[in-house]
Amino acid sequence: MKKTLTGSKLSTNLQVSAEEQRVEYFKNGIGSTSDKLNSFARFKSRQNFAKDLCYYELFKATQGILGSIVECGVYYGHGLMSYANISAALEPYNYQSKVIGFDTFSGACGESNKDKHNYIELKDGDYKAESYSDLLRAIEIFNLDRPLNHLPKVELVQGDMLSTIPAYMQNNPQTIIRILNLTVNLYEPTKIALELLYPKIPKGGIVMINALNYVSGATLALDEVVGINNIELKTFDFYPNITYFIKS
């Protein structure tokens, strides 16, 4: 396997080549930047289309359930802003549902001995995206034309989740969560997120967690906190990397 430009460690050389060609096509394809943004399907991979469908399906499955969407592991903000835009499109007046993103914005941290048994190598510093300031600008633009834009919708929490999640929950005890989106892979941050955030999910809410069954840390954390035998783990046929369960 060959590392992608910024994407998955699981990509094949052929997928990397396709990504490189998309990048080149985006640079040199016809149309202004505005034209390209408004015809973005020309440049998007089938994998990213499938991932977006997962976000849509998870959101639709929790419509009518009170709570915010929390993403642990923001990276460049694809999931964060996908949820924000889906929420603004489908529930434009649901001011009680925020989108909250936790990330160090300096790469993964918290590697432990429980992260050693993986099909792919994971280490501190992986998935580094110093995107905090950039995403604040994305959120600012997102707010321009949405209903109820005088009320905050998207929130970023910067820092090590082992300290930021406890601090956030202490300062925001009113928090209820309809979707908990976990993409950090490592044992320690996944465990603290589940310990403190899972109890804030009502029945019918969803936990989405990446990399189960081939990354040891996330799998062990889920089993220790929730218990794999206590839940029905589901996947999407069209994008099996995303695993989720509905709280019952």
Image (tube, helix red, strand yellow):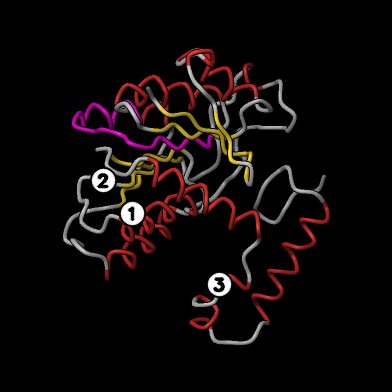
Circles 2 and 1, Cβ within 8 Å, touching? The answer is yes
Residue 185 percent coordinates (x, y) = 57, 31
Residue under label 1, please give it: 87
Disc ID at residue 108:
none
Q: What distance separates the C-alpha of mark 3 from that of mark 2?
A: 27 Å
The quadrant of the image that shows the N terminus is top right
Task: Say which of 148 and 171 sits in front.
Answer: 148
Closer to the chain start, of discs 3 and 1, is: 3
Disc ID at residue 97:
2
Circles 3 and 2, Cβ within 8 Å, touching? The answer is no
Q: Residue at x 65, y 32 (%)?
A: 123
Quick check: 228 above or below 171?
above
What stretch of residues is rendered in magenta? Answer: 165-184
- Residue ranking furthest to the bottom: 31
Disc ID at residue 40:
3
Identity of the amino acid at label 3? Answer: Phe
Q: Residue at x 58, y 87 (%)?
A: 31
Identity of the amino acid at label 1? Answer: Ser
Q: Residue at x 38, y 56 (%)?
A: 86
Closer to the chain start, of discs 3 and 2, is: 3
Closer to the chain start, of discs 2 and 1, is: 1
Disc 1 secondary structure class: helix
The quadrant of the image that shows the C terminus is top left
